[in-house]
Amino acid sequence: MTDSAGKAAEPDTPGGEGADPGSAPDPADPAAPGAAGAHKRRWLRWAALGASLVVLAAAGTGWWFYKKLDGNITTDTTAAAELETYEKERPSPVVADAQNILLIGSDSRQGAGNSKYGRDDGGSQRSDTTILLHIAADRRSATAVSVPRDLMVNIPACRKPDGTRTREQFAQFNWAFEFGGTACTIRTVELLTGIRVDHHMVIDFSGFKDMVDAVDGVEVCLKEPVDDADAHLKLPAGRQVLHGEQALGFVRARKSIGNGSDTERMDRQQRFLGALVNKVQSNGVLLNPTRLYPVLDAATKAITTDPGLDSLKDLYDLARSLRGVPTEKVQFLTLPRQPYRYDPNRDEVVEPDAGALFKHLREDTPVAVSPGQSSTAEGESPNGESSSAPEDESDGESDEKPDDTGPASPAPTPTFTGTNAAVSPCG
């Protein structure tokens, strides 16, 4: 084409003569294709930067939480050194991967918030509560055995805090903790049971309260109202949820609830601990970080433990290994005992029940609990008298099958008086 002057028309080109000035894309125009791409790339860069900052902040916060919880734990190196001295006389582990942990509730009045529970006479302390926790090697059951504080036992010669040593003596069990602390208590338990104690934890008053508060309290039922000044406890009868201070008073109270015996107090402690375990598992605390942290914070502040369990990783690995234990397989019982023959205010072990219990825990073979009367594989009743089961009239012959083609049926699982975490305290 030519214009009116006969000159060929220039093709329209961006920016050239004949181009429509308004048709060229403006890089500053958000609607322009190039601007949209640049804007998107800038947004992606800012989003990536923001995500990186969030990840770094989360990692930093997580690390801070970890270090804080890890730093809460107190390590008991004194007991570890003392036990090392007596390593040759301690029992050997029998079953690999099974764990025996001694839990000690200290009644020391030392420490923040503990002085109001009694007079601290120079730092002396006794173990109000001692529980031997056996965790099966397959992690499918856990059995907690309460050792009565007034049980008469052989206490070995132990090193006292001032460096002197006590003499070996026959005395009530909780004196071992007063004489020589944790190491003396562990050696006394091992001497009594023949079971190797792999780890230990000492829990104080304030820590117990904080752990109960961290799970929003534990439900209990009382047949009668309670008013106990010594335990700082005043409660109405009926169903109710106990929080820290009340919970501590409930498990410590002795003379104001029931018949006032230490036996009943141990039963009450077992039921309360079972309810606490059940609540932690049923409420998904272990799988919810926002609920788990307060529990871990309270627990790690509460305990003094041996070097083998003194890190958050050690405790987490232990807790994780127990997540698969059904609540009905978390069992609580008291070591078989009866009033001491020379002093009804003290206890003594009942045989062969106690021996059978120790043997099964030592060899990591099952035991069962029932609210009713105990029975052992040997057919003995809790008071040591023969049960009413008929005697074998086979003239001492073996229990093999008649054709001797195979072994006899396995021995029945011994049953002891106790409860489990699936049983409601208000059941």
Image (cartoon, rainbow, N blue to C red):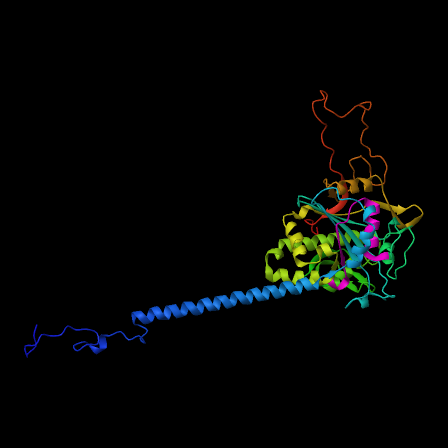
Name the image quarter holding residue 258: bottom right
Q: Is residue 336 magenta?
A: no
- Residue at 65%, 50% (x, y): give it: 321
Residue 374's spot in the image, x, y percent? 79, 41
Residue 117's spot in the image, x, y percent? 81, 65
- List the single residue furthest toward the bottom: 5
Residue 245's spot in the image, x, y percent? 74, 64
User: Residue 103, relative to residue 209: is it above or below?
Assistant: above
Which quarter of the image is occupied by the N terminus? bottom left
For residue 214, say whether it is visible: no
- Out of 229 and 14, give the one closest to the viewer: 14
Q: Find the magenta span and give its range.
A: 180-207
For residue 184, say whether it is visible: yes
- Residue at 62%, 61% (x, y): give it: 291
Residue 254's spot in the image, x, y percent? 83, 57
User: Residue 267, relative to residue 30: is it above or below?
Assistant: above
- Residue at 78%, 66% (x, y): give it: 111
